[in-house]
Amino acid sequence: MRALLQRVSHASVTVEGEVVGQTGPGLLILICAMQGDEEAQADHLAAKIAKLRIFTDEAGKMNLSVRDMGGSALVVSQFTLAADTSRGNRPGFSTAAPPEEGRRLYEYFAKALEAQGVPVDTGRFGADMKVALLNDGPVTIWMES
């Protein structure tokens, strides 16, 4: 699985004019299941993200996790994280998991993160989503499992 984390002051996802998911201070997580991924990759990534110390403490150092600071996460499916740009000018997405498997692992990941003690809201898999965010820092981190 691939994930792009953004530390945010707030973020939301809108589909057809309706806000379907949002978070206050915490994380916006764009997530992509890759071919061959299984629950083990989702579990590993969820556990790592829940403990990742990227929020500032009272001394101004990145020393707190999203759990430590009482934050939440907005998890958004993002198959374009599988983009292969090595040839030509149009990215290929053949390494992304098929849609049914991608949906299953996306939903599994959101539940796994919630099981780690992080409140989770989600976007809508496969929808044309509009994502709004205020990146805090900015702090943006790429992860793979």
Image (tube, rainbow, N blue to C red):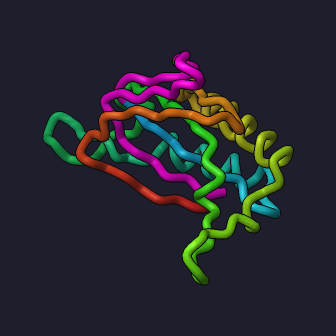
- Identify whether 12 is placed above or below 61: above
Question: In the rendering, at what x and y percent does residue 124 appear?
Answer: 66, 30
Q: Indicate left or right for 82 with 102 as reference.
A: left
Where residue 112 sits: x, y (%)? 68, 36
Q: Does the magenta segment cover residue 141?
A: no
Quick check: 69 above or below 142? above
Residue at 54 percent of width and 45 percent of height? 30
Q: How many marks?
A: 0
Secondary structure of the magenta portion, mostly? strand
Residue placed furthest toward the bottom: 87
Give the residue displayed 73% in from the left and 60% down from the top: 96
Asked if the stretch drawn in magenta spans residue 18, the answer is yes
Provide residue 120's location: percent of width, then percent of height. Answer: 56, 26
**Quadrant for the C terminus in the image:** bottom right
Residue at (41, 29) in percent of width and height: 11
Residue 104, placed above or below residue 20: below
Quadrant where the N terminus lies?
A: bottom right
> For the point 60% across and 71% down, which residue is it?
90
Which residue of the protein is positioned furthest toward the left in this rendering?
59
Q: Position of residue 9 (x, y in %)?
A: 31, 30
* Magenta stretch in the rendered image: 1-25
Q: Is residue 59 left or right of residue 3?
A: left
